[in-house]
Image (cartoon, helix red, strand yellow):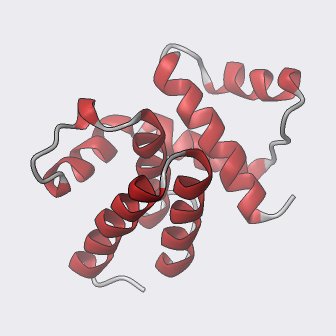
């Protein structure tokens, strides 16, 4: 499984968690195994855990970048991508270059949302990266 595939699997589980927030991480992995739509590995599990276990903090990081928007108005796909990406930018899943994180987030946005959503994701994450001065 490539890192891109792992990120996509993690995105699906983080997205699922938006609709079923009471699912435990074990239940989410069980869902993935039973669905047979995608595989999971340790990297996927680390990404999901980082995004789900830190939801409140990650949402607090997203909120200041929302100009004329509220968190609850974001499309669920966008919110899932942002949570997953910020968890990675925060180093909760190991050291991953910011450019890789942003690029993968944009690709997920293009695949699961719209071009406009992908541009929004790129802009928001780009602002975070610039403000933090990370590479």
Residue 2 spot, x, y in % from top left: 82, 64
Q: Is residue 95 above or below residue 133?
A: above
Q: Quadrant of residue 43?
A: bottom right
How many numbered badges does the structure rendering display?
0
Quadrant holding the C terminus: bottom left
Is 20 situated left or right of 71 in this image?
Answer: right
Residue 92 spot, x, y in % from top left: 49, 57
Q: Is residue 127 above or below residue 51?
A: below
Q: Is residue 18 above or below residue 66?
A: above
Is 86 situated left or right of 36 in this image?
Answer: left
Can see residue 43? no
Q: Residue at x 75, y 29 (%)?
A: 29
Can see residue 74? yes
Q: Residue at x 38, y 36 (%)?
A: 75
Is 86 situated left or right of 7 in this image?
Answer: left
Q: Quadrant of residue 96?
A: bottom right
Is 96 situated left or right of 127 in this image?
Answer: right
């Amino acid at each position: 499984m490539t890192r891109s595939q792992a990120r996509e699997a993690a995105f699906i589980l983080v997205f699922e968690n938006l609709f079923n927030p009471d699912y435990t991480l074990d239940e989410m992995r069980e869902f993935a195994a039973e669905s047979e739509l995608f595989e999971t590995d340790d990297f996927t599990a680390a990404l999901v855990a980082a995004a789900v276990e830190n939801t409140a903090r990650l949402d607090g990081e997203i909120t200041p970048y929302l100009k004329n928007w509220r968190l609850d108005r974001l499309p669920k796909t966008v919110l899932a991508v942002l949570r997953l990406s910020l968890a990675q930018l925060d180093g909760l899943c190991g050291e991953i270059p910011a450019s890789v994180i942003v690029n993968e987030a944009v690709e997920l946005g293009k695949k699961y949302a719209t071009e406009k959503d992908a541009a929004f994701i790129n802009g928001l994450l780009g602002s975070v990266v610039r403000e933090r001065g990370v590479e």
